[in-house]
Each structure stands twice: as structure tokens, then as C-alpha cells.
Amino acid sequence: GAVVSQHPSWVICKSGTSVKIECRSLDFQATTMFWYRQFPKQSLMLMATSNEGSKATYEQGVEKDKFLINHASLTLSTLTVTSAHPEDSSFYICSARTHTGELFFGEGSRLTVL
Amino acid sequence: TQLLEQSPQFLSIQEGENLTVYCNSSSVFSSLQWYRQEPGEGPVLLVTVVTGGEVKKLKRLTFQFGDARKDSSLHITAAQPGDTGLYLCAGAQDNYGQNFVFGPGTRLSVLP
């Protein structure tokens, strides 16, 4: 299957700082990528849909100024958590859609805000 | 918004037993995907089913897409501890795979 890579896998930061998470499709081009948040022992919660070359579409209740998404190329989307606070601590996962419509997920990034 | 339900939510079985996980909706999906997720990792795609009534086998896993493309099942034969994980189904709401709806997941624990 296709390969999607996230970086970093783990990040610990101080409250008030910003953190950037990268999502790369390594062996295919993805015009659409998705960002999710996952709480312990729960399913995925879609945060936003990232479209290459255009603004991201955010789900209801997700602050676009808090979670900045940039999809500048067909193989890279970034999620920046701005002015992070302890309640932003979570497992963030991205996925990329292939031209056949299948979703492949990154390994996830665990954010801990102190 | 189309909703996907999964049952059971939790399942704990002994190694060697068989089990079936269900994914149901009142809406039709153009395709449906099954994923397995282990703690601290991203979901891994197991299979995509597209045609109503389709059955796909992946070693000890058998996936079926309902005739009406509203539901799906995953059957595991002779479960092993390595099958432990969170099983997610995801339905594509359009033919372009632009919009996916995820089920809440079934957390499977296979005890040795």
C-alpha cells in the first residue's frame, strides 16, 4: 500500500508555544489530506480537510486560528498548533487520499503540552 | 451526516476463537474500508470493498459488503493475540473518496 509519514512522532512543548506537525505522502501525490485528533480509547475525530493549493475546510467546532493547516505541495501538509495549551495534548493523525479513493494514514504524532 | 455504527464496541476473547465485527449505517456508501489500529500508531488499511455483496479474504480475515452497500462485516477465524487492536470501518460518501465517515471502532483483545 501507499506510504504516509508523519513527523514528529512525539513532541513535548511548553504552554504558549507553537508546534508544527508534518504529513508526507512518500510514494504518491495527494491532492487531499485529512487531519484527525484521537482521544484515548476513542475513534478518530476529523478536524479538517486539507486541499492542495487552497484553504483547508474545518469541521464544526475546530478553531481554524488555533489549528493552522497548510497544504503547499501534493506531498506535504502541515498542522500547526498555535499557542498550545495542556488541553491540546492529544494524538494527531493525518491521512492522504490516493487517486483510487483509498485513505492511508500516517503513524500519528503524540503532542504533550506542559 | 451519514453515521456508521459498529458493534460490539468491546470484545475480549481467547486465542483460537472466532469473532465477527459489524459496521452498519442507514445510508449507502460508494465504498467501505476497514482499518486496524494498534496503540500509539496510525490506522492501517486492511481492505476496501466497493461492490454490493462483495467478499474479500485476507488470510484469517473475511470481509463482506452488504448487498445494499449500507453495512459490512469482518470475520476473524482462529483469532490470535496479534489481532488485538482497534478495528475501524470507514465509509466513503462519494465516488471520489472526498468524504469519509468513520465508525466508533471495535476494540478487540485476544488473550493468549
Image: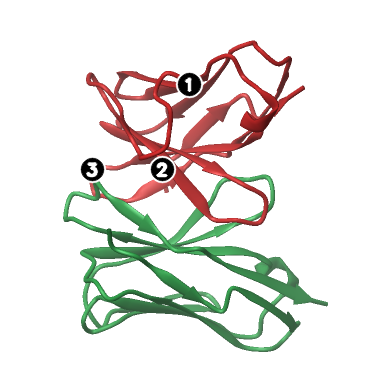
Chain colours: A red, B green
Figure check: A47 above or below B39: above
Residues at marks 3 and 1 touching, judged by CB atoms closer than 8 Å: no
The lab-note entry on whether marks 3 and 1 share a chain reads: yes
Reading the image, the residue beneath label 2 is A2
Image quadrant assignment for residue A59 = top left
> Residue B6 appears at what percent x and percent y?
48, 73
Task: Say what amino acid the circle numbered 2 marks.
Answer: Ala
What is the number of the mark on residue A66? 1
Q: Secondary structure at mark 3?
A: loop
The mark nearer the N terminus, 2 or 3, is 2
Q: Which one is in front, A30 or A67?
A: A67
Query: Is the N terminus of chain B in the top left, top right, bottom left or bottom right quadrant?
Result: bottom left
Q: Residue furthest bottom?
A: B17
Reading the image, the residue beneath label 3 is A99
Q: Which one is in front, B72 or B60?
A: B72
> Residue B59 appears at what percent x and percent y?
53, 75
Task: Say what amino acid the circle numbered 3 marks.
Answer: His
Kindly identify the residue that appears in the image at 47 percent across and 27 percent down: A23
Observer-side mark, 3 or 1, equals 1
Q: Chain of mark 3?
A: A
Figure check: A114 above or below B19: above
Task: Say what amino acid the circle numbered 1 marks.
Answer: Lys
**In this picture, residue B76 sits left or right of residue B98:** right
